[in-house]
Amino acid sequence: MPPRPPVSRHFPTITEVLRLPVLTEGMPRVLAGASQLDRAVRWVHVTELLNPADFLEGGELVLTTGMPYPEDPSKLRDYVDQLADVGAAGLIVELGHRYRKVPEELVAACRARDVPLVELARGVRFIDVTQTVHALILDAQGALLRRGRDIQDIFTALTLRGASPEELVHTTAELTGAPVVLEDLTHRVLMCELLGRPYEPVVSAWARRSRAAPTLEKIAPSGPEGWLIAPVQDHHGPWGRLVLLDSRLHTEPDPEHVLVLERAAVALTMARLAGPAWWERRAHRSVLRDLYERRFRSPADARARAEALGLPAFGHRLFAVVIRHTRHGGEGEQLDERIAKALTQTGVRALCGETAPGRIGVLLALAQASAWQPVAERIGRLAREELGEEAVVAVGPGVTDLSGIARSWQEAEQTAEAITPASPERWFYVPADVGLPELLGVLREDTRLQRYAERQLSRLIEHDDRNSGDLLPALRAHLTAAGNKSVAAKLAGMSRQAYYQRLHTIERLLGCDLESGLQRTSLHVAVLVLDARGTAAPGT
């Protein structure tokens, strides 16, 4: 990411204005709206009119001596309503000309509309106030313009080099110092940058909270939490929203935050328009990897993130599914999409994404009473259809909480790794399908097993190498037939007499008794290790 430009100054707040020497001389005292003193002051307007709204645009700090204030309390309320409706920053009343004390009706009206009301016990020169404050405002506006150019340059550079949506979201959060969420129109959190904060308090119950915050015509605080929201488009129109969550509820948005959010939303729209963007798959893949590698801080964080992406993690049985394949390029990502669509069409909720080269992960969330086998078979059929007969689908044990899904995932991964072409053909496999041959296949790189096989069979292999013999195939047939010599002779393609001679030679060379079940088991393990390593002797 490009280096962040220095932070600029923004419009002064009412609190900052009241601290200016030109106003402290008037002994200011806040009578109403104390919680709104962080409002930005965009201008200072001096007026003695009863209808000031006709000359205001919003954000002005109104100065008055109170000269025209009527005695009728209802007209005082109308006056305050006008200020509130137009969005004036606040009202400052100088005592001494009309009032020795601000009327209670005016105070009550400002409190009712949460309009900051300040009295000045001593007279001040309004011209000095306006000049001082306007100088600050103009300085802030210039700084904001310069900052806007810096922000524009940052997002232009990111767009030109084809930055990922994750990087655009991360940059938005870095520039604003606040959590940022990218959601689609169904209120699923596809990407988020929380700047080190835990997921659970930020994205929990996201869909409900997001629906309470509509997209406004301009970027302004929306919904009960005061989110700033910018729409993101694609070729078909509205696609999603970029949401800035600031823990401080502002009646006026930070102008710099608005600039960043606008530029980021444009950059994301450009990325959507630039070509096919499997952003949902990217989001699924990211969450699946985080679950598998236990990156979440807590089970509550994992559950909140999964649910924000649309997976119901509570009250469901969760199954980890691993698809092993040998295809290259983008075929795995395309299968991700097809599996996700096929499951969605049948009402199955799942996360689906490529988790590693040659691996596709699927996290299923099924109702407690529903059967998982038909869903696993559907995935298996689709995987075989799309990726060929070599595709292997493995399903880990079901769990009822995401805290156990990493172990389920590991078992599914180990099962997928263990299945070989010699394994019984099934649409999907579970850990119980891993037999001795599959287990030894997984452990085939273990040097201890390799040394064991060599010690057991080296004399036999050396004899076959010297004599172009067939003792090892004869032994394999004997072990496969569980010691039944007639069946074994047929498997080896020999006459019974010739086969018996081979067995005697094997027993002599190895110094073993092939009638012993224990010795047969030891030899069978050694042969399976050789087969798994692909180091069997010639003629096998």
Image: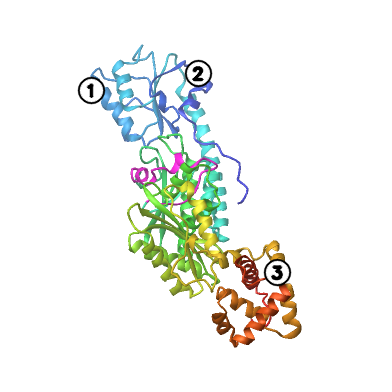
Q: Nearer the viewer, residue 254 or 430?
A: 430
**Spatial separation of the CA atoms under disc 1 and disc 3:** 104 Å
The residue under label 2 is 24
Closer to the eye: label 1 or 3: 3
The residue under label 3 is 456
Closer to the eye: label 2 or 3: 3
Q: Secondary structure at mark 1?
A: helix
Q: Are marks 1 and 3 in contact (CB under 8 Å)?
A: no
Q: Nearer the viewer, residue 498 or 265?
A: 498
**Spatial separation of the CA atoms under disc 1 and disc 2:** 32 Å
Q: Are marks 2 and 3 in contact (CB under 8 Å)?
A: no
Q: Height in image: 146 above or below 469?
A: above
Start-end of magenta stretch: 187-212
The answer, for residue 288, to whether it is visible in the render is yes
Snapshot colouring: rainbow
User: Residue 80: image x %, image y %?
Assistant: 31, 26
User: Residue 367: image x %, image y %?
Assistant: 34, 53
Q: Secondary structure at mark 3?
A: helix
Q: Nearer the viewer, residue 375 or 227?
A: 375
Mark 2 surroundings within 10 Å by alpha-carbon count, few (fewer than 14), some (14 through 19), many (20 or more): some
Sooner in the amino-acid sequence: mark 2 or mark 3: 2
The answer, for residue 235, to whether it is visible in the render is no
**Spatial separation of the CA atoms under disc 2 and disc 3:** 96 Å
